[in-house]
Amino acid sequence: MVNFWATWCAPCIKELPYFEVIDQREDVEVLLVSLDFPKHKESRLLPFIKKHKLQARVVLLDDADENSWINDIHPNWSGSLPATLIYTKKQRGFYEQSFTASRLDKILKLFNPQL
Amino acid sequence: MKSVLILFSSLLLFTENHGYKVGDLATDFSLPNIYDEMVSLSDYDDAKGFIVIFTCNTCPYSIAYEDRINALDTKYKSKGYPVIAINPNDPAAQNGEELNDMKQRAEDKGFTFPYLQDKGQQIYPKYGATRTPHVFILEKQYKGNVVQYIGAIDDSSRNPDKVQKHYVEDAVDALLAGQLPKVSTTKAIGCSIKTL
């Protein structure tokens, strides 16, 4: 489960705890991809991770050429945050929206890691 | 099995966007500017087209583009393609997006272009804007304002020093030369449009 977020994005911050809960599961791996400004890595992103004690893995996507990689992540993604990609070996779903905890659980049930 | 697969794919596709595609006619509007005066595309008799940009006060990606939007307006207004900025956010859903806040921001940054509020949020869904900033370049033709470009301002939102492709400038230059833009749709990261 790959969540695209940023420290300044209010709806992203609201749903982060739900992804942290899912990260505790053994059958799902969560990756939090930050789209913070690279120049704010030390001043905002790292302090945020520390302050909120984020457990899931966080990476900073600092490739400037967004037009090339947004479509690679999913053709339906307009580029708006937050956005979430969920995939197994054979299933792939993309969600340009914010989640509630229960909605995220429901969506996750559509994915069968055995497939 | 097939129907199960179809059902599954339709579940995955429910967030797909609607709105204008390149070639569609764009609706005009009547929206308040920062002085609470109504502005429409039809007010611009001499325009050859418009650079319509959905943008806002609070999104860091929008803020990062403010100087570049001013530069676009300065460069292209005299050539017949003024910038028209529209704030699509519902001020009840996001602090700092009231008309007063917009006025303050426009004055602080010396906006050279009209900064309108999508009051009632009727216009951005028609265009299909999904984020701020989100650009729609319209070319004025006899049949109306034709959408000729949808997408990003350039290829480096977070760092103006690393811009290599000036999508909007290239598209307007092409239109001014009587050609269609070579690149007519692009994508960029932006903030979701805030609604209640």
Image: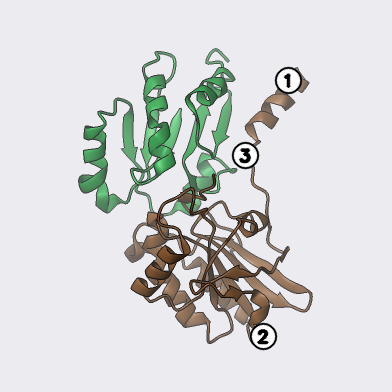
Give the residue at mark 2: B45
State how far apart marks 2 and 3 are (Cα): 38 Å
Query: What amino acid type is highlighted by mark number 2?
Result: Asp
Q: Residue at x 56, y 51 (%)?
A: B130
Q: Chain of mark 1?
A: B
* Chain letter for the brown part: B
| Residue B116 or residue B191, whichever sits in front | B116
Give the residue at mark 3: B15
- In primary-sequence order, the first of circles 2 and 3 is 3
Residue A34 lies, in percent from the top left, at 36, 41
The C terminus of chain A sits in image quarter: top right
Which element type, helix, strand or loop, lies under badge 2? loop
Residue B180 lies, in percent from the top left, at 66, 71
Q: Colour of chain A?
A: green
Q: Which mark is residue B4?
A: 1
Which element type, helix, strand or loop, lies under badge 3? loop
